[in-house]
Amino acid sequence: MDSDIQGFYKGKTIFLTGGTGYLGKIIIEKILRSTEVKRIYSMMRPKRGESIRERIVKWQKDVVFEELLKSKPGAMQCVVPIAGDCLAPDLGINAADRRLLASEVQIVIHGAATVRFDEALHLALDINTRATRLMVQLAKQMVHLQAYVHISTAYSNCVVTHVEEKFYPEHLSCSSDKVLDIREQLSDQLIDSMTPALLGSYPNTYTYTKALGEDLILREAGDLPVCIFRPAIIVPTYKEPVVGWTDNLYGPIALIFGGARGVLRIMCVNTKAHIGLVPADYSANAALACAWKADQNAQSGTVEGKPTIYTLAPSDNNVITFGRFIDLSFACRDIFPLSKMVWYPFINCVSNPWLFAMGAFFYHILPGYFMDLILRLMGRKPRMVDLYQKIHKNIALLGPFTRRTFIFDTKNTNRLRELMSAKDRIIYQFDMASLDWTDYFNKALLGVRLYLAKDPHTPESIAQSLKLLRRLKILHNVLKASLACGAGAILWSLSRLLIN
């Protein structure tokens, strides 16, 4: 017998944007594996010479769909690509496809976004805000629409540190409609030159344009059966469809990978601050539950004028600090290290930006020049100094989020889970209160080794990696002892000079 949520999706037609992204793939896989959905229209554009149909076919070899295709070999036939582009007028969807979507779609999940913190404002506006308006306009033409989920981020209102599940239009310098009007009248260059004035207290174009996207939903969604889903920082899967699966190097995963490689050795972070991490599979499950609840609210007439907001973030009684995050990131260092380490993995944390700049010079820049010299002598292209410049830029971009604690209200999300049946709470698990962080990181770190480092999880590979780790640890300790002796010799010489 179907669960309530499975029953809701049975026979439905879904329109999804962002399906080629990390979370989008997991949402599609979960829908296909756990429900008897009729069809998923996935908006996508050609990429690197591949047509949209070729991109779907390529998914057949993607590890994230492996278990699905074992149990349902023909599942991918339910996924129909729709040519579109968030940067194009009318989303780049042709008239025939728009008529098709308007007549068939019952559920919309809008997840397409640019997540780059330093994206040019004109691009971030077009993708994260203008495309949201175009999606709302398209949804209003859908005659059978039952639910619309707008995927935002828990950090869309990071100008406050206690973020409730409500809208914050008062923190925007201009409303979404006014900003989009300005965007239409000015060139890309002029819009970008206005970035500081428009952003105001927002730390980057990503959070600002996501906040504008929420404001647009508030102002223009009208009587659509819409809700907003705000996941915190999405990290590798916990349990499904593949343990520890990830395919990108964004945010905390880049820190984990850089630390595991022995490249990242110092961080500017407040170790006592909380970090908002949520597994990707929990995020997908919550998004699907949100659509079910949006339909229920529409049917019961309980919509109270403003769309409901659901935030998925660590539970108040199960938070994780940056200090613990870093400790857990090295929990498996001596069990299954990476095979391509440049130095013994460790990270020192400082909270003062000036101290970080000084430490980065000795921990990163000087070793970077030394490694580049070796690369030149080997006839290879130097790259470490450039790499460290990129790392330091990313650390600076993350600064507003790594040095203070954000508290996220999750009352609506907790209530949503309480309203789900016992069966649904198992199938669509997203209970952050019961998440075992130690167990999670053990699985996530294995995923980093498998899917980012591309190291096979075999006894031979692990043995070779452990051998390299032991060698690097000896070199690391020899270097520390040498530096300590050198420092001691300098201090001794200085003391003798002062005495004499």
Image: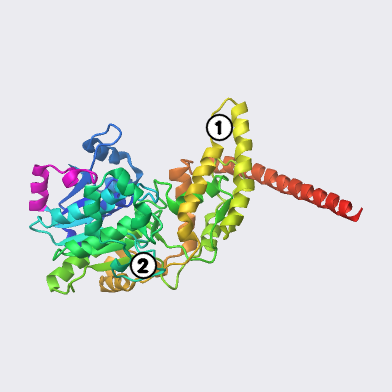
What is the three-letter code of the residue carrying label 1?
Answer: Pro
Q: Secondary structure at mark 2?
A: loop
Q: Residue at x 60, y 45 (%)?
A: 364
Q: Is residue 67 visible?
A: no
For the N terminus, the quadrant is bottom left
Q: Percent position (x, y) of residue 194?
A: 34, 51
Side (left or right) of 461 relative to 468: left
Give neighbour class at mark 2: few <14, some 14-19, many 20+ (Cα, 10 Å).
Answer: some
Q: Can residue 95 be found in the magenta stretch?
A: yes
Mark 2 — residue?
431
Side (left or right) of 498 relative to 457: right
Q: Percent position (x, y) of residue 201?
A: 39, 62
Which mark lies nearer to you, 2 or 1? 1
> Which residue of the protein is positioned furthest toward the right in this rendering?
500
What is the three-letter code of the residue carrying label 2?
Answer: Asp
Q: Earlier in the sequence, mark 2 or mark 1?
A: 1
Give neighbour class at mark 1: few <14, some 14-19, many 20+ (Cα, 10 Å).
Answer: some
Q: Residue at x 10, y 55 (%)?
A: 142
- Highlighted magenta segment, given as a residue range: 85-104
Q: Secondary structure at mark 1?
A: loop
Q: Percent position (x, y) of residue 382?
A: 55, 32
How far apart are the alpha carbons under marks 2 and 1?
46 Å
Mark 1 — residue?
382
Residue nearest the observer in this picture, 300 or 281: 300
Q: Percent position (x, y) of residue 473?
A: 66, 46
Up/down of 159 relative to 456, above or below: below
